[in-house]
Image: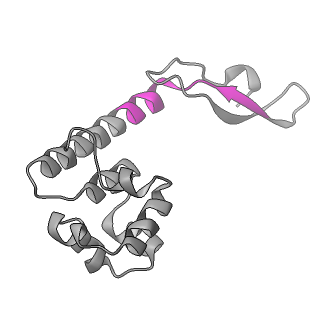
Amino acid sequence: MNKANVPQDIGPKNVEEIAYAVDEQGRYVKVPSIGWEPKNTANEQAWEVIEAEIAEQLRLIKVGKRSPLAYHMTRNLMTAGLLASYMGLPRWRVKRHLKPRPFGKLPPELLARYADLFEISVSQLKTAPDAS
Protein backbone atom coordinates (compact mmCIF):
# COMPACT_ATOMS: atom_id res chain seq x y z
CA MET A 1 0.00 0.00 0.00
CA ASN A 2 1.27 3.44 -0.83
CA LYS A 3 1.63 6.03 1.91
CA ALA A 4 -1.11 8.17 0.33
CA ASN A 5 -3.56 5.24 0.38
CA VAL A 6 -3.45 4.50 4.11
CA PRO A 7 -7.09 4.49 5.31
CA GLN A 8 -8.22 7.52 7.29
CA ASP A 9 -11.87 6.61 8.00
CA ILE A 10 -13.00 8.14 11.28
CA GLY A 11 -14.27 5.53 13.70
CA PRO A 12 -16.49 5.78 16.78
CA LYS A 13 -13.57 5.71 19.22
CA ASN A 14 -11.10 7.74 17.10
CA VAL A 15 -8.21 5.46 17.96
CA GLU A 16 -5.05 6.17 16.03
CA GLU A 17 -2.85 3.28 15.01
CA ILE A 18 0.29 2.80 12.97
CA ALA A 19 0.20 1.24 9.50
CA TYR A 20 3.19 0.39 7.34
CA ALA A 21 3.19 1.74 3.80
CA VAL A 22 5.59 2.44 0.97
CA ASP A 23 6.75 6.04 0.58
CA GLU A 24 7.79 7.90 -2.58
CA GLN A 25 11.29 6.37 -2.43
CA GLY A 26 9.96 2.81 -2.15
CA ARG A 27 10.85 2.39 1.53
CA TYR A 28 8.49 1.05 4.19
CA VAL A 29 7.53 3.77 6.64
CA LYS A 30 5.19 4.07 9.60
CA VAL A 31 2.07 6.07 8.78
CA PRO A 32 -0.56 7.10 11.36
CA SER A 33 -4.06 5.91 10.47
CA ILE A 34 -7.34 6.72 12.19
CA GLY A 35 -8.94 3.60 10.79
CA TRP A 36 -10.60 1.76 8.02
CA GLU A 37 -14.40 1.53 8.00
CA PRO A 38 -14.68 -2.31 7.99
CA LYS A 39 -12.12 -2.59 10.80
CA ASN A 40 -13.79 0.19 12.78
CA THR A 41 -17.16 -1.56 12.42
CA ALA A 42 -15.73 -4.89 13.58
CA ASN A 43 -14.05 -3.24 16.58
CA GLU A 44 -17.26 -1.41 17.48
CA GLN A 45 -19.21 -4.69 17.40
CA ALA A 46 -16.57 -6.44 19.49
CA TRP A 47 -16.70 -3.68 22.13
CA GLU A 48 -20.50 -3.94 22.25
CA VAL A 49 -20.16 -7.65 23.12
CA ILE A 50 -17.53 -6.88 25.77
CA GLU A 51 -19.67 -4.11 27.31
CA ALA A 52 -22.66 -6.47 27.40
CA GLU A 53 -20.59 -9.11 29.19
CA ILE A 54 -19.41 -6.53 31.73
CA ALA A 55 -23.02 -5.46 32.30
CA GLU A 56 -24.03 -9.10 32.80
CA GLN A 57 -21.26 -9.63 35.37
CA LEU A 58 -22.39 -6.49 37.22
CA ARG A 59 -25.96 -7.82 37.26
CA LEU A 60 -24.77 -11.17 38.64
CA ILE A 61 -22.73 -9.39 41.32
CA LYS A 62 -25.74 -7.30 42.29
CA VAL A 63 -27.94 -10.40 42.77
CA GLY A 64 -25.20 -12.17 44.75
CA LYS A 65 -24.20 -14.83 42.23
CA ARG A 66 -20.72 -13.49 41.43
CA SER A 67 -17.91 -11.84 43.34
CA PRO A 68 -16.40 -8.50 42.28
CA LEU A 69 -13.47 -10.51 40.92
CA ALA A 70 -15.71 -11.47 37.97
CA TYR A 71 -16.13 -7.80 37.05
CA HIS A 72 -12.40 -7.05 37.19
CA MET A 73 -11.58 -10.19 35.23
CA THR A 74 -14.10 -9.34 32.49
CA ARG A 75 -13.12 -5.66 32.40
CA ASN A 76 -9.53 -6.77 31.74
CA LEU A 77 -10.66 -9.12 28.94
CA MET A 78 -9.62 -12.25 30.82
CA THR A 79 -11.06 -15.72 31.16
CA ALA A 80 -10.78 -17.79 34.31
CA GLY A 81 -8.07 -19.85 32.62
CA LEU A 82 -6.02 -16.81 31.68
CA LEU A 83 -6.40 -15.27 35.13
CA ALA A 84 -5.40 -18.58 36.71
CA SER A 85 -2.31 -18.67 34.52
CA TYR A 86 -1.26 -15.15 35.53
CA MET A 87 -1.92 -15.89 39.19
CA GLY A 88 -0.16 -19.26 39.18
CA LEU A 89 -3.31 -20.95 40.49
CA PRO A 90 -5.37 -23.87 39.21
CA ARG A 91 -8.34 -22.75 37.11
CA TRP A 92 -10.80 -24.40 39.50
CA ARG A 93 -9.58 -22.15 42.33
CA VAL A 94 -10.06 -18.98 40.29
CA LYS A 95 -13.54 -20.19 39.27
CA ARG A 96 -14.28 -20.75 42.96
CA HIS A 97 -13.11 -17.21 43.78
CA LEU A 98 -15.70 -15.90 41.32
CA LYS A 99 -18.35 -16.97 43.85
CA PRO A 100 -19.17 -14.42 46.58
CA ARG A 101 -18.75 -16.63 49.66
CA PRO A 102 -15.31 -18.10 48.80
CA PHE A 103 -14.13 -14.67 47.59
CA GLY A 104 -15.16 -13.15 50.93
CA LYS A 105 -12.96 -15.67 52.76
CA LEU A 106 -9.80 -15.09 50.72
CA PRO A 107 -6.69 -14.31 52.75
CA PRO A 108 -5.31 -10.76 52.47
CA GLU A 109 -2.18 -12.05 50.70
CA LEU A 110 -4.19 -13.59 47.86
CA LEU A 111 -6.40 -10.51 47.57
CA ALA A 112 -3.24 -8.40 47.32
CA ARG A 113 -1.92 -10.64 44.52
CA TYR A 114 -5.17 -10.23 42.57
CA ALA A 115 -5.12 -6.47 43.17
CA ASP A 116 -1.50 -6.21 42.03
CA LEU A 117 -2.30 -8.14 38.88
CA PHE A 118 -5.14 -5.75 38.00
CA GLU A 119 -3.08 -2.74 39.18
CA ILE A 120 -5.76 -1.64 41.63
CA SER A 121 -6.06 -1.48 45.42
CA VAL A 122 -7.53 -4.30 47.47
CA SER A 123 -10.51 -2.08 48.35
CA GLN A 124 -11.15 -1.51 44.63
CA LEU A 125 -10.86 -5.27 44.04
CA LYS A 126 -13.58 -5.89 46.62
CA THR A 127 -16.05 -3.61 44.85
CA ALA A 128 -17.58 -3.18 41.42
CA PRO A 129 -19.56 -0.25 39.97
CA ASP A 130 -23.26 -0.34 40.85
CA ALA A 131 -22.80 -3.66 42.60
CA SER A 132 -22.91 -2.37 46.18
On-image quarter of the C terminus: top left
Q: Which residues are magenta?
A: 30-44
Residue for point 23% across, 65% down: 98
Reply above or below: 12 against 110: above
Instruction: Decide which of 85, 2 is in the foreground and name it.
Output: 85
Reply above or below: 48 against 99: above
Residue 27: x and y, percent?
87, 36
Reply above or below: 81 against 90: above
Residue 126: x and y, percent?
30, 55
Q: Is residue 29 left or right of residue 79?
A: right
Residue for point 44% across, 66% down: 112
Instruction: Decide which of 80, 128 is in the foreground and name it.
Output: 128
Magenta span has 31?
yes
Tag count: 0
Picture quadrant of residue 51: top left
On-image quarter of the N terminus: top right
Residue for point 44% across, 73% down: 87
Reply above or below: 36 against 128: above
Seen as rendered, the residue at the extreme bottom is: 90
Residue 23: x and y, percent?
83, 28
Magenta span has 122?
no
Seen as rendered, the residue at the extreme right is: 25
Residue for point 75% across, 25% down: 3
Residue 106: x and y, percent?
29, 73
